[in-house]
Image: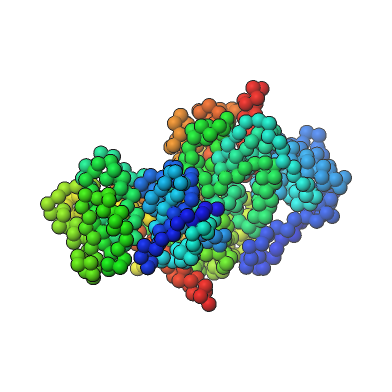
Amino acid sequence: MMKKRIDMSYQDPLERISNFKEVALGYNFEEALFEANRCLECKHAPCIKGCPVGINIPGFIRQIKENDIEKAFSILTNQNSFPGICGRVCPQENQCEAVCVRGIKGEPVAIGRLERFTADNVSAKEIQPVSVKYEKVAIVGSGPAGLACGGVLANLGYEVHLYEALHVAGGVLTYGIPEFRLPKSIVKKEIENLKKLGVKIHLNTIIGKTKLIDELFEEGFKSIFIGSGAGLPKFMNIPGENLNGVYSANEFLTRVNLMKAYDSTYDTPIRKMKKVVVVGGGNVAMDAARCAKRLNVEEVYIVYRRSEKEMPARLEEIHHAKEEGIKFVLLTNPVEIHADERKNVKSVECIKMELVESTEGRARPVEIEGSNYEIEADTVIMALGNHPNPLISSTTADLEVNKWGCFVVDETLMTSKENVYAGGDAVTGAATVILAMGAGKKAAYEIDKKLRGK
Amino acid sequence: MYKILLKKELNPTVTLMEIEAKDVARKAKAGQFIILRVDEFGERIPLTIANCNQETGAVTIIFQVVGLTTKKLNALEEGDYLLDFVGPLGKESEIEGLKKVCVVGGGVGSAICLPLTRALFEQGTEVEVILGFRNKDLIILEEEFKKYTNKLHILTDDGSNDNKGLVTDKLRELLNDTKYDKVFAVGPLIMMKYVTLLTKEYSQSTIVSMNPVMIDGTGMCGGCRISVNGKQKFACVDGPEFDGFSIDFDEAIARSKMYQETEREKDCNLLK
């Protein structure tokens, strides 16, 4: 049996840095069949335990072997409403694929690629609206958690209203993750499907401002799920951070993805950039760097204070970023941003770091005194993570949050306020799409249990 | 979609529009703002709420035609629709308990301080208002201000209304023998900077209203960050009103020019 997994085709790096089209092109039928046949269908199936939502992985792969894509899809959607999204953005190498038995003496089965293959090749089924037989439920935020929660509740027969602050639904799937990693047509299709199910989507509505949680109850909602994510950008608090040319990754990605700054038919302005420094080592940093690369930028650097081994970004994203010519400046941290006389960024002063053992598990980066040097740059993008937004917690009495501003929930995902549930990044702090979807789905079943008195 | 119920030209470069947005009208308070997008290709821009009518659901915005988006907006007529309109955003003006206040407005900023002036007047505060314009043809909302002020001073840079001067000249004159509970300054950054430099001399506590570039208006993009007492704040959620003495105006002025070049080029492309 083959030790190596079947390669997936990709757009050539030199070609793709001048477009925003999807980088990974997916398996064809033959490739998928070959790869599926690498699955041993182990009885103890460690992959299922490795999956945050417990997808029957050997089960769906079995169906690919049988060439029954419809059945494979239905096994996937038993646990995961949006396999087309998760097949693309899940960190499989830390989850299901990390524990795959084939990985012991070779490469693990490419579970993510097979998931994506199934979602991309299932024949489109006409979605019928589910007739409403139960109460009204409100969902705050149309990101992964909200979409997953809404889908389950609508299928159960609830009247679902989904509230979104921005002018397009999808949350981070729309404004954050770039087109070349997750085509917006896929997100759009999932949202259209929810609408067909009967979910009503209210755009341009900020819960905590336009309407308050308590007002939703007054309007007759019996239960509310908050999936408002973690959207407040962190900065480093170093001198020069408010200079012209310093972006949060949120702003940069929103301009590029949501407001389509890369497409000249849109009005959205973005800086003319020649040299860009992205600070951070997560997926968001990779996304920002790769977007910058596609905007005709000469040099893009990723500056990260630890070494590559500690980078939280997916291996695949790091690999793609390198292929695209992004330069990694590791064990380095910015200490100040310098400007020209018009307050435009001119350079980033950095200091070299070394890792020391730490009792907290991850090695701790420490500055090497006197190692300061400057990287010439006209744009700096801070991709340091996000806090949850306080708009809802600060306008709702009896809604408890912890010291990081995350909602405190019990084991049924109910907050300190009766019939208000929360899940996803708003509870955990910034995490993954699949965990948020899992939480949204769990909350939906808990809401149903409570309202049906089960 | 949000219908334009009324469009009125206040002066050759300043337009008033009433937009149908019931949810916004229901909640809006003086000092808050909205974000709108004209069409699918448009930017999101913040504008202060100039008035709202809870019964008709109309929200009034007043804007100066300065860039691409306001040009597009101004090209629309009554009965047309805006694609997106969201709010109310930001915190409301803190006016409770104020007995005597001076409001200083400059240019289109005058429109922005009308709801504040009105709210102050209606709660029984003694309100003195100083408005500054370049010339008499640019004077806006004079009648409305008269309704809600105890004393109104309108100045022009060129003296064409027979009252020549800068708002800071008038304010200095007033501060020489009056102490206010608060001075509110609303207008161009440069005006607010000089008002606060002046009021600082008199230790006269002053509130300014910041209106930087932003995208979402909910704290997500961080584009609207400003330095307040050396600490980073987001104008969209921590403001838009701040203690004038604590603001780094030079930084705010530089940030406000971030996209001037790119936008000018865009504009040229449109004219081709």
Residue A360 image point, x, y percent: 51, 38
Which one is nearer the viewer's eye here, A405 or B97?
B97
Quadrant assignment, res B192: bottom left
Which one is nearer the viewer's eye here, A22 or A126?
A126
Q: Residue at position x 38%, y 44% from top?
A: B29
Which one is nearer the viewer's eye here, A255 or A133?
A133
Residue A148 image point, x, y percent: 65, 40
Residue A332 image point, x, y percent: 48, 55
Which one is nearer the viewer's eye here, A137 or A101?
A137
Q: Residue at position x 49%, y 62% from top?
A: B77
- In the displayed structure, B93 sits above or below B254; it is above
Question: What's the image's color scheme?
Answer: rainbow
Residue A285 visible in the snapshot? no
Q: Residue at position x 70%, y 42% from top?
A: A197
Q: Residue furthest bottom?
A: B272
Residue A151 visible in the snapshot? yes
Q: Residue at position x 17%, y 57% from top?
A: B172
User: On the rendered image, what quadrant is the C terminus of chain A found in?
Assistant: top right
- In the displayed structure, B167 sits above or below A86; it is below
